[in-house]
Amino acid sequence: MNRAQLIEPDLEFIRELKTRGGEAVKKCYQCASCSVVCALSSADHPFPRKEMVWAQWGLKERLLQDPDIWLCYQCHDCSRYCPRGANPGDVLASLRQVAIIQNAFPRWLARMMGDPQYLLILITIPVIILGLLIWSLGSLQIPPGPIVYRKFISYEIVDAVFLLTALWVVICSSIGIRRLYSGFQMTRPLADVSILSVNGLKKHLLPTLLEILQHTSFKDCVVNRARYFAHLNILWGFILLAFTTASVATGIYLFGKQTPWPLYHPVKVIGNLGGLILITGALIALWRRLAYGSDSGKTTYSDWLFLLTVLLTGISGLLTEVFRLVNIPRLAYSTYFIHLVLVWILFVSLPFSKFAHLLYRTTAMIYTRIQRMQESL
């Protein structure tokens, strides 16, 4: 005889979901239309129907330990065909926001980054740090002569700040991923699998990364196809810019090749292309949200903050080059300072903002790939 199980709804959790975009969750009456129309939902572990049930019941732990919430791209095929207007896509998006906060380290910083009342503090911190560094070097004045940004603040100082920030981001991200993985193991335990072995890389990690780079699953979405192009452009914009940054650092520190490099230099071409692709992706995403409203899904503060930061980072990066080429020192150096601030904000928010989807979705995709492979044996 089956034992009775006591279910204790977390009412505070339900209220938090509603404030983060899942306010229609109670409209769901379990017709399962959402799971039927979702092209990404699997037969063994369909979603988002079960997540809607758990959300209505306030089963916080079960939801936050569910890898399926990360397999959703919020394309809104499910919401379009929901006969009750329960917007399952928005509910899963709100679940991901809560999951980021719960897995984050430190958790209070994730809450700050998701709350508009702390925006000024978020901007002020890098302004003060970079401003003090420039002041300490005695270079608050516009440097005379040709525009060379290392005369305003040395690359060694900039790199030191961002390397320390990167170390901190890696530590925080690792803790968050570990918490997420442990949660998955609580609900769907796997046999021991070494992803970092040669066999593990071949079977699990590399195929997942290839799928992410191509956004293969996103192509199956129908209603909101523009999100596919927006996401793909933003992803590849970051990849090209990361390659450019690494190449420039290699050129400076290993070969002594100081910047600025000529516009026709291949690395320069890739960097400018990456910036344009990044801006294009952010503009597509913002246009969809402004032009199509609810058809593009519920837009939260976290969405706007991430997209606007991405857009302004790309624009400010290109303007630093434009103002240098047309020789307007005051605009060039001030724009460069703004660009550094925006890059720092984007960088430091990786484990805590919508940027964390890159980490958590990748983890969930690898986890479910392993699980499906084991279940098929």
Image (cartoon, helix red, strand yellow):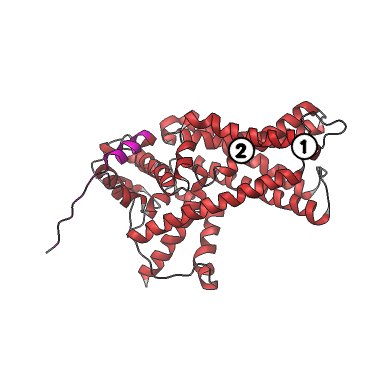
**Residue type at numbered disc 2:** Thr
Q: Residues within 10 Å of mark 2 (few under 14, many from 20)?
A: some
Image position of 24 with respect to 67: above or below: above
- CA gap, disc 1 and disc 2: 37 Å
Q: Position of residue 316 (x, y in %)?
A: 68, 34
Q: Residue at x 46, y 60 (%)?
A: 366
Task: Please state the total of marks drawn on the protein image.
Answer: 2
Q: Position of residue 46 (x, y in %)?
A: 33, 54
The question of residue 24 being in magenta is answered with: no
- Seen from the viewer's position, the closer of residues 29 and 196 is 196
Q: Is residue 8 left or right of residue 356?
A: left
Question: Looking at the image, which is closer to me, 31 or 15?
Answer: 15
Q: Amino acid at mark 1?
A: Leu
Q: What stretch of residues is rendered in magenta?
A: 2-19
Secondary element type, mark 1: loop
Magenta residue check for 14: yes
Q: Earlier in the sequence, mark 1 or mark 2?
A: 1
Task: Inspect this view and state whether residue 361 appears.
Answer: no
Q: Which residue is mark 2?
A: 280
